[in-house]
Image (cartoon, rainbow, N blue to C red):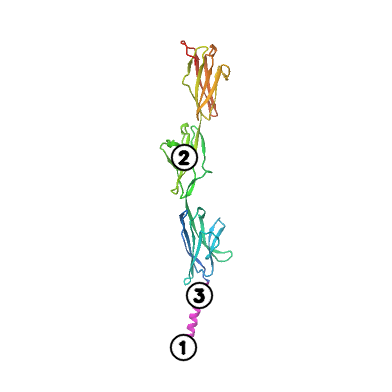
Amino acid sequence: MHFLQILLLISCSILTRSSQVQAAATSAQPVISDITPDLVASVGDDIEFNCTVENVGRMSVSWAKRTSEIGSVVLSMRNILSLSDPRYTIVETNDDKANKATYTFKITKIEATDMGTYECQVILTATDKITKKLNLAIKHPAIISEENTPKSMLVTEGQNLEISCHADGFPQPTISWERENRAIMPAGGNSFDGQTLRIKEAHRLDRGGYYCIASNGVGQPDRRLIRVEVEFRPQISVQRPKIAQMISHAAELECTVQAYPAPAVFWYRNGAKLQSGSNYKISNTASSHESTTSVLRINSVNELDFGDYYCNATNKLGHADARLHLFQPVIPVPSM
């Protein structure tokens, strides 16, 4: 074969291979080779996302924010913003030799609403695309949920009580508990750590305010006061179970009732309920949240008034009675 013919064949072979390489390069599928990893930032920070696409060619590359499992909002297309938010910037950096480009999406002074999932998308066809995503988490202070945290709790004495406090925030808040006025907790100590406060066999002394405190190191801790009420059946105490008084003088019989809910208090004599009238006057005074003082005043004692009287207190949990005895003394007692 002639030398020129051999040279021509070699040249044709080289050109053919070059064309094949160029065609392969042209037809190579784009690949997202690098994307910024997940970010954690604070409100007010400036951030940027980078997405590098190889074999980009003339493909459309966009940044989008996912709004649901099936939808997203396009923020940019190549080097053009799709939304006119002044905090947004998009920069396209091309490397023509390597046939790749990097798309840098910047957000200045981020807000809590910027948190979410962002996608770098390479649009192949109207129905097909290549995507990679990253998550942006934004630190925000702990906030106790009003919907999922009670304002008050009611328990019957002797029963167990659980109070749960729920809080949102990033990082995830920790929960602790304190009593109002730094009182001792039911289990001892001045505080308790944990989402759920448990009071075993609640006692009336456990009633009062409990603070749920949520903290995550961002801003100030959030606090919520939860009122605990403990129901219990009436208990009656009498300081003077025996009262001496002379005929024609006034006498007062008194009992103090501890109960919650507040009890109905009545006085009885010989099985009959006494009413305020010409000779009797009954007054009930609530001296505290769970204490009621009842006084039976006899305006002018006669012989028929001597004997036993019963102070009776009733609420939905039960009732209690206390006996008081009025008698005539040997030595006259001054009139009240």
Q: Residue at x 50, y 21 (%)?
A: 254
Q: Residue at x 51, y 57 (%)?
A: 117
Is residue 9 on the magenta stretch? yes
Query: Which residue is at the far bottom?
Result: 2
What type is the residue that disc 3 sits on? Gln
Q: Nearer the viewer, residue 326 or 31?
A: 326
Q: Is 139 located above or below residue 262 in the figure?
A: below
Q: How many marks?
A: 3
Disc number for residue 22: 3
**Closer to viewer: mark 2 or mark 3:** 2
What type is the residue that disc 1 sits on? Phe
Query: Which residue is at the far top?
Result: 330
Instruction: Point out residue 42 in the picture as x, y percentages from the top left corner.
Output: 46, 53
What type is the residue that disc 2 sits on? Tyr
Q: Is 316 located above or below residue 27 in the figure?
A: above
Q: Residue at x 48, y 35 (%)?
A: 208
Residue picked out by circle 1: 3
Task: Evaluate if marks 3 and 1 touch, with contact meaning CB atoms under 8 Å apart.
Answer: no
Magenta part, dominant SS: helix
Magenta segment boundaries in residue numbering: 3-26
Q: CA distance from mark 3 to mark 1?
A: 29 Å
Q: CA distance from mark 2 to mark 3?
A: 71 Å
Q: Residues within 10 Å of mark 3 (few under 14, many from 20)?
A: few
Instruction: Point out residue 261 in the picture as x, y percentages from the top left corner.
Output: 53, 30
Instruction: Point out residue 16 in the picture as x, y percentages from the top left corner.
Output: 50, 79
Residue picked out by circle 2: 211
